[in-house]
Image (cartoon, rainbow, N blue to C red):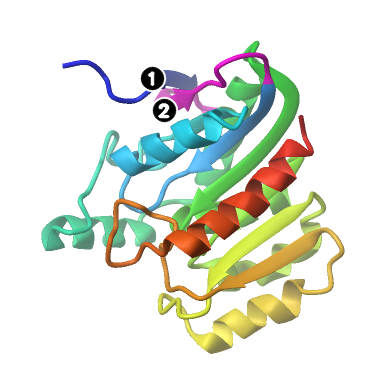
Amino acid sequence: MPNEFSGEMIDIAAKDGGSFKAYCSKPASGSGPALVMIQEIFGITDWIKEIADQFAAQGYLVVAPDMFWRFDPGFVANPAVEEEFQKAFGYLGVIDHDKAVEDVDAALTAAKAMPECNGKGAVTGFCMGGTLVYLSAARLDLDAAIAYYGTQIHEYLEEGKNVTCPMLFHMGEDDDTFSVEDRNKIHAALIGKENVSIHMYDAGHAFANSHNPSHHVPDAAAAAHERTFKLLDSLK
């Protein structure tokens, strides 16, 4: 059966030894900024591959690494299956955020070395990936960062002062994965930084995931992606 996706799985060397898989989708022609796309807790799902392809079609070189490779390589969960959902949710407490940022750095290094990269590098991600985008923006040398509804950003607000690249936060007004109090802490810590923009949408958590019909909000997703593309296009 032919692959329905335009990208392919590649191997990336980890900074501390070993290697991990990543889904790589390249722009159809020319070159563009490298974009590391960080998964939700469900792994490199068909949706991650699909949206990586959609972003690549906009002219970006997209690499989506397996963020759980250190303890369950190749893990993919269907959120509609309760047992799989609970296993994925449990991995939020297993992943080492420091090592995960190192892996993002390794993925970005690999992507920037590809001929399809124009030398610029950015990071985006969803849910758990949104938190890792924020930490990557604080710790790595990025040209841009875009976090979609990160679930643990409020636990790392002291690192906000280190975010110097242009950064977008896409958040749902009705996101119930953290409290309104924690959301307000994020706003208080980051609103006013001239390089940071926070956008709120009439939606809940995971509103960009078109494979999750109970959460997907097409209008919110489209508006968020339009802002994301505008920022990333500035790197072309």
* Residue at 51% over, 76% down: 202
Question: Residue 233: x percent and y percent?
Answer: 73, 37
* Residue at 71% over, 69% down: 158
> How packed is label 1: few (under 14 Cα within 10 Å), some, or many (20 or more)?
few
Q: Residue furthest right?
A: 194
**Residue on which the image places disc 2:** 23
Which residue is at the front of the view, 130 or 31? Answer: 31
From where the camera sits, is residue 201 visible? yes
* Residue at 35% over, 55% down: 94
* Residue at 37% over, 62% down: 216
Tell me how far mark 2 sits from mark 1, CA to CA: 6 Å
Vertical order, 37 against 131 (above or below)? above
- In the image, which residues are magenta? 13-31
**Residue on which the image places disc 1:** 8
Vertical order, 179 against 111 (above or below)? below
Question: Residue 3: x percent and y percent?
Answer: 27, 20
Question: Residue 151: x percent and y percent?
Answer: 48, 67
Residue 124 in magenta stretch: no
Q: Amino acid at mark 1?
A: Glu
Left-right relation of 120 to 169: right
Q: Mark number for residue 46?
A: none
